[in-house]
Image: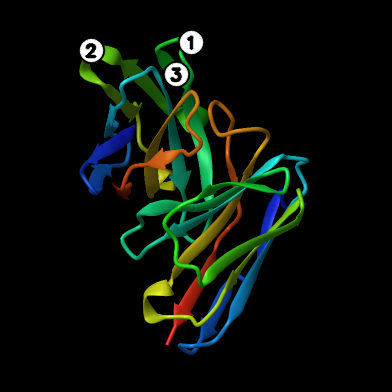
Amino acid sequence: AQSVTQLGSHVSVSEGALVLLRCNYSSSVPPYLFWYVQYPNQGLQLLLKYTSAATLVKGINGFEAEFKKSETSFHLTKPSAHMSDAAEYFCAVITQGAQKLVFGQGTRLTINP
Amino acid sequence: DTAVSQTPKYLVTQMGNDKSIKCEQNLGHDTMYWYKQDSKKFLKIMFSYNNKELIINETVPNRFSPKSPDKAHLNLHINSLELGDSAVYFCASSARGPYNEKLFFGSGTQLSVL
C-alpha cells in the first residue's frame, strides 16, 4: 500500500526566504503525487501534481516540486515566501488501480514578516 | 458559483442526536468523496461514490451512512452522534477517478458534538 510522510508538522520562514516542505513516499509501483494547500477555514486546493511526465513540476503561486525516484521524495519549494503563503500543505499519493488518494499528515507553513 | 458546496458550514449538536450534511457539485464530475479531518489536521477518506455507486467504504462506523440521490449530490447522515465524531468533514469531487485528476473540495463542515 502506498503512503506519504511529511517531515515537520510546522515550518516557519521569513518573508522572502526559500520555502522547502518535505514529502517522502512509499510505493511499490510508480506513484502519482500531489501537493494540496489548505488556507484557514477553507477546503483543499491543488497546487501541483506529478503524473510520470516531467520530474520537475510547476504549480500555482510560484511553487514547484521535484520527483526524485532514487530518494522517494517529492519536496515542495518556492524561492521567495510571501505572507499569503501561510497555510497548511498536504502531500498525497495514489497509484494506478488504487481507489483512494492517501494524504500525509500536513505541514503548517508560517511566514514571519 | 461555488463548484463544490456543502451545508451547513457549522454544526453544533448534542451526543445521541442524528444529523445530516449535504454536498452538491456543479462540475459534472462522476466521482464524489467524503473526508474527515481531525483536530490534528489529519485527513482520511471515509467514502467514495462513482456515478451514484459506492466504491470506497473505509472502516467507518455504521452510524455513518452516505446517500447519493444523483451523481451531483452526496449527503452524509450520522446517527447517534458521539464526542469522537467532532471534526471537520469535507466533501470533494473529481472528474473520473483520483489517479491524475484534481480533487475539488468543499469548504468543510465543522461538526462539534457536545
Q: Residue furthest front?
A: B62
- Element assignment for label 1: loop
Give the amino acid at mark 3. Answer: Val
Give the x, y percent position of residue A62: 46, 28
The residue carrying mark 2 is: A70
The chain holding disc 2 is A
Q: Residue at x 55, y 61 (%)?
A: B108
Q: Residue at x 42, y 73 (%)?
A: B85
- Element assignment for label 3: strand
Q: Is residue B7 above or below residue A18?
A: below
Give the x, y percent position of residue A30: 38, 17
Residue A53 is marked as 1
Question: In which quarter of the view is residue A74 placed?
Answer: top left
Label 2 crowd bin: few (<14), some (14–19), many (20+), radius 10 Å: few
Q: Quadrant of the C terminus of chain B?
A: bottom left
Q: Is residue B5 above or below residue B49?
A: below
Question: Do residues under tags 3 and 2 come within 8 Å of each other at their CB atoms?
Answer: no
Q: Earlier in the sequence, mark 3 or mark 2?
A: 3
- Dot in front, 3 or 2: 2
Looking at the image, residue B96 sits to the left or right of residue B36; the answer is right
Q: Are marks 2 and 1 on the same chain?
A: yes
The chain holding disc 3 is A
Q: Earlier in the sequence, mark 2 or mark 1?
A: 1
Looking at the image, residue B70 sits to the left or right of residue B21; the answer is right
